[in-house]
Structure formats: structure tokens, C-alpha cells
Image (cartoon, helix red, strand yellow):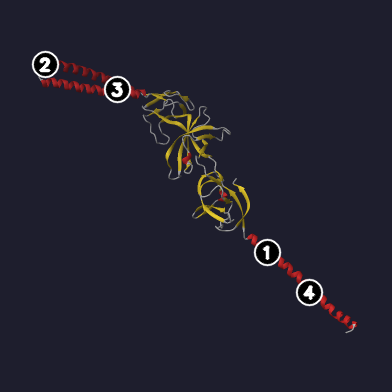
Amino acid sequence: MNQQDEHTTKRRFLPALILLGIAAALLGAGIIPRLHAQSALAAQADVQSVMNVSVIAPRQAPATQELLLPGAVSAYSDASVYARTSGYVQHWYADIGSHVKQGQLLAVIQTPEVDAQLQQARADEATARANYVYARDTAARWQDMLKTQSVSQQDADTKSGDMLAKQAMLSSAQANVRRLTELVSYEKVLAPFDGVVSARRVDVGALVTAGGTPGLGGTTGELFHVVQSDTLRVFIDVPQGDAPYVTSTTQAYLTAQQYPGRRFPATVARNAGAMDPVTRTLRVELDVANADGALLPGAYAQAHLELVSQTPKLDLPVSALLFRPNGVTVATVDASNRISLKTVTLGRDFGTHVEIMTGVQSSDKVIDNPGDAITSGEAVKIAKSASAS
């Protein structure tokens, strides 16, 4: 083949070679990116198949905790004063808001009928005494005559028996005088203790009856109502979980909305000694000194108690807890970055945090905000490590 024919042959196959190169280039441009995309997708799928989690370390729970509870303020002593004798109110000496002392005169009741009965009883006593003295002297004379056989034994015994009967009648008359004297003394209505008169329900000329008619609305028979407010009782209901930490040494104070920033020191005086079966709470009484009268009986206050635990355990945020059928659970990450579910026992409740009594160690890596579908043995990747806050 000469040179001209060879040149002609090259010219004939050149377009085919060009088309073949273009086709190969186009084919490579479509396949190679797809292969890269598939490889990247596979790598991304592998990464996403391992869940990223944030872990926290359990910290030491605080030894003290403030418990805030609503309290009902009551007077230390609260008494309704009734009439012990029937009559008309002659005068009253204490009005609402008056500070009174124990035994101070509150009112005077006129009891003319009782006064007359007392006079009659005293007259009856005098008669009984005269009869007894006469019978006693007579019995003594007959005993002297019996010694000389001037009278019979039976007659002497009759005189002695008459003396004893007259003595019994005298004792009965004396008892009646004491009863009426006591009723007359009730003409003076006295304060039962140091306190404040919170109610006066009588006026001059009002008819009052002994004992009144307590229990009937509108006609209770109450003359005065006296409260002792220099010391107050505050009743609170402590939840069952916190009840063991409330003792006589527990530090406590009160706050009231009308006195912002002021604390009223209180002491734990006593408790009911039994849980309320309905509310599962323990009724506790706090005593509060109220010499200046700032707090009023019947007011609302908030009680602050400092609960102290002698053996504080670990602390975790409530966001780390899982509530499963077998109990409260936390998810931890082991050394091989796999999930391990642990059942825990809860202690004191701090609001956003809770005390963990058993189930975890301080060295555990606890997953914060675990998903509900999380399971043991699942591989995870720790994205962030932080302490419980």
C-alpha cells in the first residue's frame, strides 16, 4: 500500500475514532459521578446508623433541700366564751380588737332569780344547821343518860340517828349554797387567757342563757370570741416522701405575701404521727412567735423547711429518666459505646433534678434525653459529654 492509500484509510476511520472518544467521554461523565454518589450515600448511611447521644455524669446530691408548702395560720388558743348563768347583760367591758389578760372582766350579767335562790339556800342552810345543832346536843344528852341507865339503848340510838339525818340535811343545804354561789360568780364573764377579742356578740340588756345554744346558726349563744395570737400555730401537710426528714430540729420559717422579703422564724412543734390515707401526707404543726401581731390567725402563709439528709446519694436531671413497665430506667453508655439500660430507685425530688438512691454509679455515662425506643446493646456515638446541671 502506497502512502496515498494509507492516508486515505486514516481519513476514513478518523470520524469513527472521534465519535468513539466522544462516546467514551460521555459514558465516563455519567458513570463516575454516580459511583461517587453511591459511595458517599453508603458512607452517610453507615454514619447515620450509629445514633449520636449526649451523656452526663451523675453528681452528688445536695445534703439539704428546701421544701416549700402552703400553711394555714391559726391562733395558738381559740375559745368561744358562753354564759354559765342565765340573765340580762348589765354591762360589757371589752370590744372587738381589745387586748385582754387572763381573768380580766369582759361583761357582767344580772341574775336576780339566782340571787334570790342563793338567799333562800342560805336560809335553808341556817335552818338545817340549827336543826343539826339541836339534834347533836340532844343525842349527846341521851348518851350521858344512857350511862346511868336513865333511858333505854333504843331511845339513845334513835336520837343519834336523828342527829346523823340532820347532819346529812345540813350537808345537802351547804352543797346547794355552794352551787348557787358558783352560779352567782358566773355573773362576771372573765377572759380565759391572754389574747385578743375577735368577736363580741352581745349588748347591754340582751338575754343570755346558761350554756347558750351552741351549734345553731345565728343563735350560738356565744358572748365573746377570744384568740391568743402572740404565738401562732401553722399547719402544713408534708408529702410522704419528705416526711422522714421533718424532725423537731428541722429549720423552718414563714413568708407572707403582704410582707415581701420578711422571714418569720418557726419551729417544728409536733406532728400527727400518722399519714393521711387520702392525701398520703403528714400533718405537721409549726409554732411561730408573733409578738408584734404581724401575722393574723386565719391568714395564708408559705412554710419553708430545710430538709437534711444524712446520706445523700447521686443526682440526675429528670430528662435522663425513662419510665418503663419494669420501673424507672436510665440509659448508660458502656466502654464499647453500646447502650446499657439500668433500673434505678428514686429518692428526693428537687424539681428539675431527682435523687437516685440505687442503680447507677458516679462513673457511669448517662444519656440525657434518651428516645423512648432506645434499647440495650444498641451502638451509639457520644456527641457531647457534660456534667449534670
Q: Which residue is tagged 2?
A: 147
Distance, label 2 to label 1, CA atoms, is: 140 Å
Q: Earlier in the sequence, mark 1 or mark 3?
A: 1
Amino acid type assigned to the residue bearing label 4 in the image: Ala
Residue 176: x, y in percent?
28, 24
Distance, label 2 to label 4, CA atoms, is: 167 Å
* Relative to 191, residue 315 above or below: below
Distance, label 3 to label 4, CA atoms, is: 139 Å
Q: Earlier in the sequence, mark 4 or mark 1?
A: 4
Amino acid type assigned to the residue bearing label 3 in the image: Val
Secondary element type, mark 4: helix
Q: Which residue is tagged 3?
A: 177
Q: Which residue is tagged 4?
A: 23
Q: Earlier in the sequence, mark 2 or mark 3?
A: 2
State left or right for residue 55 relative to residue 194.
right
Crowding at mark 2 (Cα within 10 Å: few <14, some 14-19, many 20+): few
Q: Which residue is tagged 1?
A: 41
Q: Residue furthest bottom?
A: 1
State the quadrant of the C terminus.
top right
* Relative to 210, residue 140 above or below: above
Distance, label 4 to label 1, CA atoms, is: 27 Å
